[in-house]
Amino acid sequence: MTGHADRTERAKRMEHEDQTEQPDTAERMGETGGGAWLLETVAVSKRYARDGRPLHVLDRVSLGVREREFVSVVGPSGSGKSTLFRLIGGVERPDEGMIRIAGRDVTGKRGLISYMPQQPSLFPWLTVRQNIASALVIAGIDRKRAAGLASEWLERIGLGDTAGAYPDELSGGMKQRVSFLRALLMPRDVMCLDEPFGALDALTRTRMQAWLLEQWEAHRRTVLLVTHSIEEAILLSDRIYVLGGAPTTVRREIPVPLPRPRRPDVWNDPAFGRLREEILALLGRSGGRDD
Amino acid sequence: MGDRRWRRALPPVFAIAGVLLIWQALCAAFDIPVWLLPDPWSIALYMAEEAVLLFGHVAFTLGLALRGMLLGVAAGVICAFLFHLLPAVRAAFSPLLVASQNIPLIALGPLLMIWFGVGILPKLILLVLVCFFPVAWSMLAGLGQSEPQLREYLAMIGASRLQTFLRLELPASLPYFFAGLKLTATYSFLTAMVAEWLGSGRGIGYFLVLQYKGFKTTGVFASIFCIVACSLVLYGLALLAESWVLSRLRMGGSRSKGGGRA
């Protein structure tokens, strides 16, 4: 949990950011096409051979994320969202199309994004601090600074007590906070969150969404979130790409016209409900599995 | 915790004491001659009398076993690394390796003696051949067993092959390494004893041969006790090393490999 002192500090920071960020936010909401993409998938297609039969997973999927923007990709389970991330991460190569970061073709290149998977994926033999530091060292930060950063930030998000604990001593929600912090601290331009709360129970999930919103409002990193939860996408995002069909294509790109900074109770806003209906309709209801 | 541990140790202690008592009673009841089957008390007395002599021989064999084990385990670990990191090497050599384990020691021993004489070298070679295999084989299995989620995570953040090996595969293979080490520890003392039959003037293996050739059955039994005790000690040391290392790495020893606590 975030400490009280931390909360007030964050409130101050947000106030400050509120003033400086306002024009930027307005511009972001007003404009959806064009602009300088920080991360971009350009007409990306992917096919697999499954049981000898070709399986067309992604069909010319084009989407983009601007700097300091929170973008979600929503689609039914099994719509190739994780495949999309593997392509962006460079673990696999698309059959057609390319991945660009800051305008540069980085198709098949690894180590350019920070990543938060669905499972916390913490190393059981490392403490919380070591887990974070270890990832930072892989990302090229020197050992001493990595350990310092890990300790400092664990304190900052109110997890200072857990720095020396091992992952099996933490609850599911705490593990995901650590996993998020690990992704946040990676010195990369884009954070890719792959269903980060998909494995949590409904209550923890709701809390974690509010927490992530709070963290993002405070740090404003460039985020691409994959989720099958429509509410989660609306709550957190500036824009939403709705995926669907087989093979998967981008059904529509939807800007979220809710003001920033956003509060977790934003779902009371009538715009929230309208957006939810729109996306549900796009997913054909049956596809919009949600919890 | 400690209390439960003692209670768990009680049944085997009672069982061993029971067997010794029955043995002693049978020897007395049927008046079995000492050269046929000595009673435990006579063996104990003999061991006490010849303690210095026995200790000298045991120490020699133990030294040989430990050196062989160290070399064998090192060879096993290196072999596992090579096979794991270079699949072509693995494909080429693994049948050969399995075959090597089927060469009977009884045939190999004399050959090694012909090639390398009666010094320490042929004995160490024999020990290494026996000791490296369990470690190599189980560690190789362990290196390929690491958690797929962690592997995927490292791939996504751009970890190199070497980083994946050092940060994931190597620590994840440690429980398997210790499984192999325990097997090796069990075999190493026995093998060292057999190796002494390849012409040695010292060691408990040499002493054992000397005793049975002279029909000194009590001496044979005393040697057997020493050998069993040393094998158990080596196994116990491997067990201690395992629980120390694995508990430090939160791997919970042999109790819960892979399965985390709730």
Image (cartoon, coloured by chain):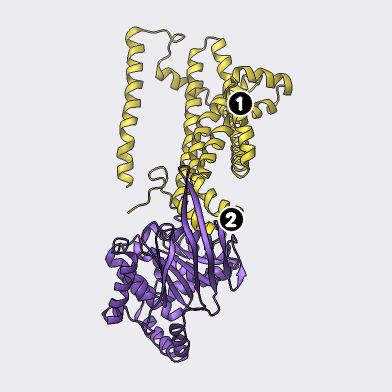
Chain colours: A purple, B yellow
Residue at the image point whose x is 64% and y is 20% from the top = B109
Reading the image, the residue beneath label 1 is B100
Q: CA distance from mark 2 to mark 1?
A: 33 Å
Closest to the observer, B50 or A263: A263
| Picture disc at residue B184 | none
Which one is in front, A60 or B145?
A60
Between B185 and B206, the one lying in front of the other is: B185
Q: A181 or B2: which is nearer to us?
A: A181
Q: Amino acid at mark 2?
A: Gln
- Label 1 amino acid? Ser
Of labels 2 and 1, earlier in sequence is 1
Q: Secondary structure at mark 2?
A: helix
Numbered disc 2: what chain? Answer: B
Question: At x 41% / y 62%, what residue is drawn?
Answer: A165
- Residue identifier under label 2: B163
Give the position of the C terminus of chain B as an image quadrant: bottom left
Query: Residue B88, located in which quarter of the rendered image?
Result: top right
Taking A33 as reference, is A112 above or below it? above
Name the residue at the bottom extreme.
Answer: A19
Percent from the top left, x then y, of residue A245?
A: 39, 60
Measuring from the top left, give residue A179's x and y in whole percent.
44, 65
Q: Chain of mark 1?
A: B
